[in-house]
Amino acid sequence: MRHRATYNWKLFTNNAAADWYFEDFGYSEIGDADSIRYIRDVKAAGSNPLMTMVMLPWVAKSAEGSGNGHWSFSVAKYGAQCSTDPYNSDAGNGVKSDCITNLIADPNDANVPLLDQPGTKDPPGSVYRNQWAAALASAFGTAPHFYNMDNEMDIWGGTHRDVHPRPSAYDELRDTYLAEARALKGWDSKALRFGPVSCCWWFYWNGANNNDKGAHAGVDFVPWWLNEVYWQDKVNKTRSLDIFDIHAYPDGPDTSSWSQTQKQALSARIYRDYWDPSYVSQFELSGPEALPELRVSDTDVVAKAWLPMGLRRNKSLRTRFRPQIRPKSWRRPRRRGPPQRASLLTRRRCSC
């Protein structure tokens, strides 16, 4: 969820980003606003939580209210906009009234800095990753210390354009991940880091900057990123990636005339596109099944997202393979219509 990428662990708030007018709210997406309490509650329920370590340099201020202005695109400050919150007429969507031109926000309007550790001249209200990681590590205790390294950073330039207005590029996605993943391991020696937590099909093959792939010898993004992380770790004699993680948002045919039973059947089988070479794709993608193309040496592979419409329960598929990366083996996939949201966890064994 986009909101977790701006979660303030001290104030229990998040910025709703492009989902809802870039406004700050009390975090309520998972019930427990306090990330430490959430870990304890999940453990008490007999499960293991997967937390998100924010890598953007900004997190939300206190929740909006009483005219405090804790939203990124104030109409009073930036002028008329294409759309405004129907419940807060001053909170705009950050697009000028022509509904084309994006505005550039001052990140300080709705956010405070998120820094790795305290310095001597930090802005008021700054919060710190090392302190948060220490608190999370204590709460994890003997449970696996699972961390998503942020969430869908490949689309920061759209979802979080108030604090990251430029499209995410190959080098940034590598460098930011490496810096924060290595730092996290120093703060929590038991950290198991998931990355790059990529958004969806398009971004397996491309950066958000459409010119960036050409600047990297035409290599698809995912194999490029994996190879770069691998070789950077070899050079530095360390390890930065524990579990390779992508979001699996499957596209599909027009189901508007389908019965609920037909939709449920499709939802149950559509993920075979990611691992079954005998499966005939439902959404006309070029190339072989996805997951067996992703070799990550001795690294576990996770594909997770939201279940497509029609399937009421979460499904879990367990696959046993050693995928193989072939950096130029796939042609750019063809898409038809917007992807359906999904909620699936597909994972191989975890040797953690």
Image (cartoon, grey):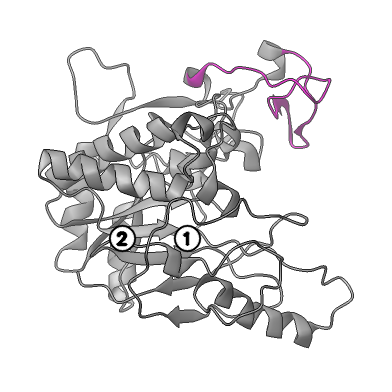
Q: Residues within 10 Å of mark 2 (few under 14, many from 20)?
A: many
Q: Nearer the viewer, residue 96 or 316?
A: 316
In the structure shown, which secondary structural element does the residue marked by tag 2 occupy?
loop
Question: Residue at point 71% right, 27% down?
Answer: 92
Q: Amino acid at mark 2?
A: Val
Q: In the rendered structure, which disc, 1 or 2, sits on the residue that comes first in sequence?
A: 1
Q: From the viewer's perspective, is 196 left or right of 76?
A: left
Question: Residue at point 71% right, 67% down?
Answer: 283
Q: Which residue is mark 1?
A: 31
Check the image and report above or below for 49 versus 24. below
Q: Nearer the viewer, residue 41 or 310?
A: 310
> Where residue 19 appears, x then y in whole percent?
64, 43
Q: Is 324 colored magenta in this rendering?
A: no
Q: Residues within 10 Å of mark 1 (few under 14, many from 20)?
A: few
Q: Amino acid at mark 1?
A: Gly
- Of helix, strand and loop, which mostly describes the magenta segment? loop
> Where residue 41 appears, x then y in whole percent?
33, 68
Q: Nearer the viewer, residue 48 or 202?
A: 202
Q: Nearer the viewer, residue 56 or 32?
A: 56
Q: Which mark is residue 57?
A: none
Q: Which residue is mark 2?
A: 296
In the structure shown, which secondary structural element does the residue marked by tag 1 occupy?
loop
Q: Which residues are magenta?
A: 79-107
